[in-house]
Image (cartoon, rainbow, N blue to C red):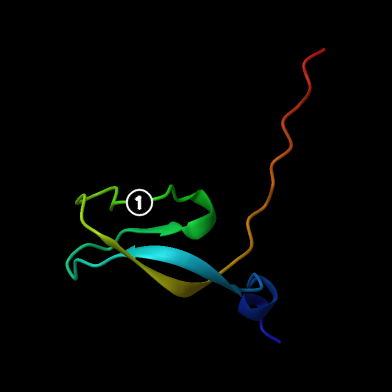
C-alpha cells in the first residue's frame, strides 16, 4: 500500500439532487434537501441521482457549563 491509499476515506453511494442545468455544478445531499428543492445557485429544477461520497462525520458540540 502507498501512503495515498491509507488516507482515502471509504465511499458509499448517497442519494443526491443534482441541478438539471448542464452548465451548473450544484448538488445537495437528499437528506439535507427540502421538498420541491430548487438549485441553490441558478434556481433551476433538480434531478434525483446518486453519487459516491464519504460518510458524514457528526460533530459533537461542547455542552455549556
Query: Residue 32 location in percent, x, y?
Result: 50, 49
* Quadrant assignment for the C terminus: top right
In the rendered image, the residue lying farthest to the right is 65
Q: Residue at x 72, y 31 (%)?
A: 61
Answer above or below: position of 29 versus 35. Answer: below
Q: Which residue is mark 1?
A: 36
Query: Residue 38 location in percent, x, y?
Result: 29, 51
Q: Residue at x 41, y 50 (%)?
A: 35
Query: Residue 9 location in percent, x, y?
Result: 64, 69
Q: Residue at x 29, y 48 (%)?
A: 40
Q: Is residue 23 left or right of residue 53?
A: left
Q: In the picture, residue 59 is in which quadrant? A: top right
In the rendered image, the residue lying farthest to the front is 35
Q: Report the number of discs.
A: 1
In the rendered image, the residue lying farthest to the top is 65
Query: Residue 29 location in percent, x, y?
Result: 48, 58
Answer above or below: position of 50 versus 63. Answer: below
Answer above or below: position of 32 versus 12. Answer: above
Q: Residue at x 28, y 53 (%)?
A: 39
Secondary structure at numbered mark 1: loop
Q: Is residue 53 left or right of residue 61?
A: left
Q: Is residue 53 left or right of residue 42?
A: right
Answer above or below: position of 18 versus 57. Answer: below
Amino acid at each position: 500500500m502507498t501512503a495515498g491509499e491509507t488516507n482515502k476515506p471509504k465511499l458509499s453511494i448517497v442519494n443526491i439532487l443534482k441541478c438539471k442545468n448542464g452548465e451548473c455544478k450544484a448538488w445537495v445531499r437528499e437528506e439535507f434537501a427540502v421538498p420541491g428543492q430548487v438549485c441553490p445557485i441558478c434556481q433551476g429544477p433538480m434531478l434525483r441521482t446518486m453519487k459516491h461520497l464519504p460518510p458524514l462525520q457528526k460533530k459533537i458540540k461542547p455542552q455549556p457549563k
